[in-house]
Image (cartoon, coloured by chain):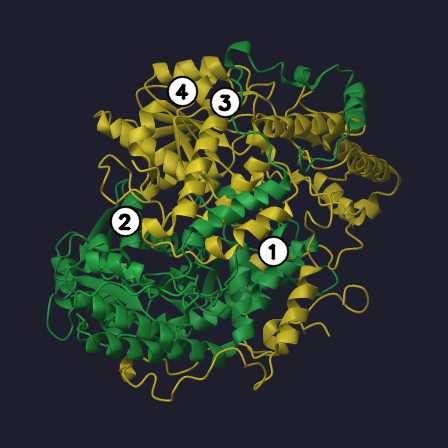
Amino acid sequence: MPYGPHTADDRERMLGALGLASVDELFADIPEALRASRLDLPPPEPELELAARLSALAARNRTDLASFLGAGVYRHWSPPVVDQILLRGEWYTAYTPYQPEVSQGTLQSIYEYESLIAELVDLDVVSASHYDGAAATAEAALMTCRATRRDRVLVSRGVHPHYRETLRTYFGGGLVLEEIPLVADGEDAGTTDLAALERLLAEPDRPVAGVIAAQPDFLGLLEPMPEIGVLAHAAGALFVAVIEPVSLAVLAPPGAYGADIAAGEGQPLGIAPQYGGPYLGLLASTDALVRQIPGRLVGMTTDLDGQRAFVMTMRAREQDIRRDKAASNICTNQALLALAASVYLATIGPHGLRDVAAGGAARATELQTALAAVGAPRIHPGPYLNEFAIRVPDARAVHRRLLDHGVLAGLVLADAAPDDPSLADGLLVCATEVTTSDEIARFADALGDVLRGRPPVAVEAGAGGNNGATTGTGR
Amino acid sequence: MSVTGPRLQPTLFERSRPGRGGGKIPHPPKDALARIPAAARRVDPPALPELNELEVVRHYVNLSQLNFAIDTGFYPLGSCTMKFNPKLNEWAARLPGFASLHPMSPDEVAQGTLQLLWELEGALTEISGMRAVTLQPAAGAQGELTGILMIRAYHRARGDTDRDEVLVPDSSHGTNPATASMAGFRTITIPSAADGGVDVAAFRAALGPRTAAVMITNPSTLGLFESRIGELLDAVHEAGALAYMDGANLNAIMGRFKPGEAGFDVMHFNVHKTFSTPHGGGGPGAGPVGVGERLLPYLPEPRVLRTDDGGFRLERIGERETSIGRMRSFAGNTGVLVRAYAYIRAHGGTGLREVSDDAVLAANYLKHRLEGAYDIPYDRACKHEFVASAASIKQRTGVRTLDIAKRLIDHGFHPPTIYFPLIVEEGMLIEPTETESVETLDAFADALIAIAAEATSDPEAVTSAPHTAPVRRLDEATAARQPNLRWRPMTGLETPCPD
């Protein structure tokens, strides 16, 4: 066993103390008929060979591409300090701070996380933490049902399709989920249809618990959040804003436009893409909902000597205390990623975060101009921050061919939203502060060539692409 | 500050000075946001702290030193399997090919990760004796929800819609009943038998046409193998219900017991327990779920599939109509799963069986060492953990388990899990794991025995512990009654920050 300390003598000594001849005797309580067949796995691999195997697998993933793919997960510069702090064993090999006297590091860092996110979203209560943006949104939806004692939730089709699919899964047990359509054309195309929302809210005898909309929405567009909130509240429903945290450096925060709950994906705060997780589910609410919010809360208190200290609190919401009456079944959460987000925010600071958001917007303008010039205009006319949809004939084939040019041309919208014919020719592309002018030129040139039917030019090894520009934390 | 000077730290907000920091991100052009309508813009910037990098580093390094962790000492937290977290795994998860891969990358861009996930599914299938495994659930509790939702879909597909009850033993993890509620079921709690095992008769009496599922942890949260599990599983299936196995305690039985072979229909794995992925101060984990034949059609999407040309791809949404749907965004906590894969490869089949053998041997040895000093309510061979109790000590001296736990801190050990399972008076659930040396086990036993003696000779020393931690016991009541859950600018009412 590669990581075990026991020598043959150690095992003999322990068995001897127990008066046993073999460890098999300790498994005698497993009925013979139920004993396992042989564990048929490859033989143990020494670290040297295993490291080579892992390196080879990692190398089979293509990381040489100039990527314009966002769709809920974004490349950003994560200062190396973030990952180096995370690599301290005192952080990552501790567990839930059940014993506060020897967990003040984790507890204070969670309190600071709650405070940092509260500043970003402009709400007072921040749960630390949930699995990802989708699970946090599902928990937010369940909160609205508990708080209003209603069972119908409306979610805009502008919310990430994975989040909507997750909501459907969570809502299969008797709660009702309905989708608010997007405006089909005109100036507001691609944003939540307010008239349709009004109709859904006005249906007699079908009271709504919560209304969920995303800012920016899945297509990168800016939603009329204040108006959505007013409509929701007028119907006695709670308003859930699905947010992207970096954007909150420059966009109005949920608290400012009357949202009761904010949910979202914290990955952009210094966390690497790593094919889906671990990420960070952000969930925050107004003070009024503090007893309904699921997940860990840490508060400030004092010890017996009056020293300031931190402790998990309001535990009566949690499953290990309340069992079937708990606010959620969540136990293990994403604490280490909450730490990553905190170190990221502390390092990058308020001005740095604004530069990240505004820098992405500037690169996106550059990208939009370059793509339009080669014949790929935006689909929607409304304002966006750093992500937008373009119209490209035969988008899926073009997207595939651009891989040969070393370009990951965003997301094929026909795959992500197959039920929306208006997006059939769409690619969803984004830029962030790490996107370079060279990458934009490579994308535009290649797209122009593909659209004109020219064969790909061979991509030079190491030309542009990721080049490790987005370290993020390997958490 | 941990070697000298005060140990507690001011908050990030108290350290902040306007004008500090910067140098990380280029300044964008001034008109970068010109196209954002004024109504959508933020008016008051967030009041985030301003710090230079050295201050950030000192803050978090000093804070880290207030934590007990596996890397700093013995952490026998029962039910949590606090084993060593191999450093190779941290290295592997950070390989740029894994770490920088976007989750919506086309399959042809992601072949390395997809192959790893496919192989890991296969390994977990073999370890559990199940038919197939999904890696999507983000943690054990989400794995439980996945399993219970599949069970609901199974009954519905058969038109068997009256089943609205889930049976759990009273020794179960709180996540079991909480999961049942979340999926819309009623929880029926079944008392344990006197020997700590499942009370098969009580289960039989509760089973019926309303029963959707039974959730069992085996070995149980008392660290005991359920010897009557075969009988119970037969009864569950005769009643038309399905059996869920909470895999939290898999570390005890690898290579000895395969839940799928024994007849369980579904189980989850806690990779941060059994397969050494770090606990991270509370997470992340990953909660893969294995299913038998009956639940195969209902696995969440997307699954990882092998293509005809030997490559790998993610299932498309809607490709399998019977699926319960998606549990979360993207494929799963892949970064965690890379670590679990490395761990399983490093051990192989023989190594994993040795892991369980050594974990069980260590727990039995430690239990043996504590006999006499503590009550051992279930005096038979345990698996990877066991319950000791301070009930007699409390009766004799007034010293409680909580006090003993706090006193262990002064001896340099993390306390075990206390007052869980709820059915043992003054219980402490002790799980040493297979990665602790005999010397460590002996030192821990010596400390617990010394504290038991001290409870008689100097109870005050125990009840006022810890004495050497950065803080003393906390005022939890005020924290709950007057919650202070976020930093606000100083009003003069707060406790002053430490220097």
Mark 4–mark 1 CB contact (< 8 Å): no
The subunit letter for the residue under badge 3 reads B
Residue at x 27% of width, y 49% of height: A165
Mark 4–mark 3 CB contact (< 8 Å): no
Q: Is residue A456 left or right of residue B330?
A: left
Q: CA distance from mark 3 to mark 1?
A: 45 Å
| Neighbourhood count class around disc 1 (C-alpha, 10 Å): few under 14, some 14–19, many 20 upward | few
The subunit letter for the residue under badge 2 reads A
Q: CA distance from mark 3 to mark 2?
A: 33 Å
Name the residue carrying label 3: B258
Mark 2–mark 1 CB contact (< 8 Å): no
Name the residue carrying label 4: B206
| Neighbourhood count class around disc 3 (C-alpha, 10 Å): few under 14, some 14–19, many 20 upward | many
Q: Is residue A17 above or below residue A206?
A: above
Q: Which chain is green?
A: A
| Neighbourhood count class around disc 4 (C-alpha, 10 Å): few under 14, some 14–19, many 20 upward | some
Name the residue carrying label 1: B477
Identified by mark 4, the residue type is: Ala
| Neighbourhood count class around disc 2 (C-alpha, 10 Å): few under 14, some 14–19, many 20 upward | many
The subunit letter for the residue under badge 4 reads B
From the image, state whether disc 4 or disc 3 is nearer to you: 3
From the image, state whether disc 3 or disc 2 is nearer to you: 3
Mark 3–mark 1 CB contact (< 8 Å): no
Element type at marker 1?
helix
Q: CA distance from mark 2 to mark 1?
A: 40 Å
From the image, state whether disc 4 or disc 2 is nearer to you: 2
Name the residue carrying label 2: A165
Q: CA distance from mark 4 to mark 2?
A: 35 Å
Element type at marker 2?
helix
